Amino acid sequence: MEDSSEDWRRTSAGHRRIIFGKYEMGRMLGQGTFAKVYYARDSVTAESVAVKVIKTEQVRKEGFMEQITREIAVMRLVRHPNVVQLKEVMATKTKIFLVMEYVKGGELFAKIEKGRLKEDLARKYFQQLVSAIDYCHSRGVSHRDLKPENLLLDENENLKVSDFGLSALPEQLRNDGMLHTQCGTPAYVAPEVLRRKGYDGAKADIWSCGVILYVLLAGCLPFREANIMHMYKKIFKAEYEFPPWFSAGSRQLISKLLVVDPSQRVTVPEIMHVPWFSKVSRTNHSSHDKLASLIIAPIPIDEPEKDEMTGESEKSMKRSKSNSSPRFYNAFEFISSMSSGFDLSGMFETHRKSASLFTSKFRASTVMDKLESVAKKLNFKISFSKQNEYKLKMQGISEGRKGKLAVTVEVFEVAPEVAVVEFSKESGDTLEYKKFEEDVRPGLQDIVWSWQGEDSNG
């Protein structure tokens, strides 16, 4: 999809800024507390995308890592034509980049600001909203912040649900099977959420859908009060009035949606059988049931830093000049290794053995040099992989309880200035491997940035 001229802006007086060797960045589309969203274009396919750039350190300091992790997990899980799609996740040592579908039409809220919608158009948007929410709920995801500002429109006037930052997954349920976090936008929040006594996230989403349908048809909120406590009183009683132009069918449906008792509130299957709703066929999303894999191999974003170590070996120099390069490390795995408080390991499949990891600010060829040196000092034999020159095997010379200890070491690249090094036991006794881990650390301390689960000092 070619971008329109108003979407595209050159940066730095006409100079192109390309990140990860792939996305050419344009103007800023929006800004939040911890992130900025930019328009971008895939330099290979010319596809328009939106790139959300999150500052890792700021998010970590403010304690919002869990929220960011959840947003990524949910967007990866929910693949539906009426949900904004997450295309890629990439990372450097300071930022996380979420590459998302670019939704050109902007917020539904902007359309409502101009006045109420015709019933047929309101029905179309509501059908697409219910289809998306039904799919989310089938995956155990409740949105918890549904409102017109979080509903976008594409170039074909189709609705796209966005902003899953406050969404909830099944693991957030307490022992009573309920959610307890009070969140969302007051005018759209279900009464049971405001009461702080636990609630069903899916049922709370249905209430929000009812408020949205009212807003689409009326051009204003059902619960309108300048004083927020007065507004809450109306929400607790579901106290609102229908404008005279509302059809009998729309009144009937909204009356079923805005029910104070969540156990009596209409369900999605029941909504779909309401005559007013079923006048237009729903969007078919059966082809979207397969989840796309998001195991990402990021491409370097910056120029390599100059090597601070001297005396590179001839082999290391050959590695630097050769066409081969270390395998890229999955962005999810890299972020997990940097902080025990931001574990994304459950978000992707992995077949890695139990291993030790450290990150280094030196380039991969230099790290390989250092590994060779340390192995020799520990009296381990070294052999290199024929398929991957950034992978080696260290083998002890003495027999242990289960034969000779053999350790495989591989160097991965996250960015030019960040390498991830993984040790894993190939054979031998586990206790001997644990001692090896202790023995190898002192010799690597001048190249280690952070061991897995420890805070980096950079």
Image (spheres, grey):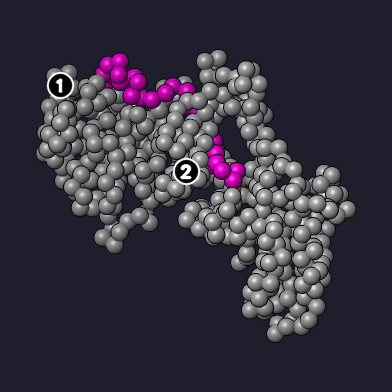
Which residue position holds label 2? 58
> What amino acid is at disc 1?
Pro
Q: Which mark is residue 66?
A: none
Q: Is residue 252 above or below residue 264?
A: above
* Residue 154 visible in the shown view: yes
How crowded pointer 1 is (Cα within 10 Å; few <14, some 14-19, many 20+) is rated as: few
Q: Pick the residue in front: 22 or 447.
A: 447
- Whether the residues at callouts 1 and 2 have beta carbons within 8 Å, the answer is no
239 lies left or right of 369 = left
Q: Which residue is drawn at 57% across and 54% down?
A: 456
Instruction: In the displayed orientation, state which residue is furthest to the bottom.
Output: 401
Query: Would residue 263 appear left or right of 359 to someone viewing this image?
Result: left
Residue 243 is labelled as 1
Q: State yes or no: residue 369 in magenta.
A: no
Residue 47: give x, y in percent of width and height.
Answer: 59, 27
Outermost residue on the right side: it is 314
Q: Does the magenta stretch include residue 108?
A: yes
- The three-letter code of the residue at mark 2 reads Gln
Q: In this view, does 10 lie above or below 333?
A: above
Magenta-colored span:
92-121
* Residue 327: percent from left, percent from top: 71, 50
Q: In which quarter of the image is residue 175?
A: bottom left
Identify which residue is drawn at 72% across, 69% down.
Answer: 407
